[in-house]
Image (tube, rainbow, N blue to C red):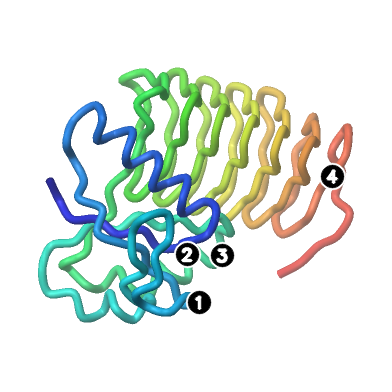
Amino acid sequence: MQDLVIIGAGGFGREVKWLIERINQTADTWNLIGFIDDGIPPGTEIAGIPVIGGVDHLFGVRESLAVACAIGAPAIRKRIIDRIRANANLSFPTLIDPSVIMSESVRLGWGCIICADSSLTVDICIGDFAVINLDSTIGHDVRMDSFVTIYPSCNISGNVRIGELCEIGTGTQVIQGISIGESTVVGAGSVVVRDLPAYCTAVGVPAKPIKFHR
């Protein structure tokens, strides 16, 4: 078993702890030693395991350690990973719940987290540190860049393109062939039937940009 820590001791961090426990029920894989969290004092126990320090603790790691980044917000997740990835002793495994249905033609980058009851069909390419949350479906030929977050119960149809740092809100539906530009946020329950530009927030049925940001 390999030692592993989870960055983020909030709700998603505790869900990732559960995901790791489910993996270990199938095969003893991970020795979960604790959480990393800047906002909680070291030694605090969360869901039965300790907070062992903040992100700076990872700079001093001198032995092999796996890291799962359980931060939902893509920009914060990227900022943390960019800080720590220079430490060659850290590795970033992709964690897949045992209930996930996925074909052999799916290609996944480093550090992805794919949660329970999700389905990924065929010829899908997903970049590094993407999160696909509970009960989501990803259709054929989808291309998803790094640091994307798909929140629970989303349905992404075939041939969709999703740019880096996007957030796709809970229950969103995206029809086939759509392109969503980088850093765009799609509000919960939206239905995306037209391409969305980069750096916007879009909501509604059908989804329309309501503001732009950089």
Query: Tag 4 or tag 2, which sits nearer the N-term?
Result: 2
Q: Secondary structure at mark 4?
A: strand
Q: Position of residue 100 (x, y in %)?
A: 42, 24
CB under 8 Å between discs 3 and 2? yes
Q: Give the Cα distance between marks 3 and 4.
A: 20 Å
Foreground residue among 27 and 88: 27
Q: CA distance from mark 2 to mark 4?
A: 24 Å
Q: CA distance from mark 1 to mark 2?
A: 18 Å
Residue appearing at x 35%, y 33% in the figure: 107
Please indicate whether residue 93 sits to the left or right of residue 11 in the image: left
Specify the amino acid type for callout 1.
Answer: Gly
Q: Amino acid at mark 4?
A: Val
Q: CA distance from mark 4 to mark 1?
A: 31 Å
Q: Which residue is identified by label 4?
A: 203
Q: Residues within 10 Å of mark 4 (few under 14, many from 20)?
A: many
Q: Residue at x 88, y 33 (%)?
A: 205
Relative image position of residue 198 (x, y in whole percent): 70, 54
Which mark is drawn over residue 78? Answer: 2
Classify the position of the N terminus by image quarter. Answer: top left
**Residues at discs 4 and 1 in contact (Cβ within 8 Å):** no
Structural distance between the alpha carbons of marks 3 and 1 = 18 Å
Q: Secondary structure at mark 2?
A: helix
* Residue under pointer 1: 39
Location of residue 135 by image quarter = top right
10 Å crowding of disc 2: few (<14), some (14-19), many (20+): some
Looking at the rendered structure, the kind of residue marked 3 is: Ala
User: Vertical placement of 8 versus 160: above or below?
Assistant: below
Of labels 1 and 2, earlier in sequence is 1
Q: On the image, numbered disc 3 is attached to which residue?
A: 75
Of tags 3 and 1, the one toward the viewer is 1
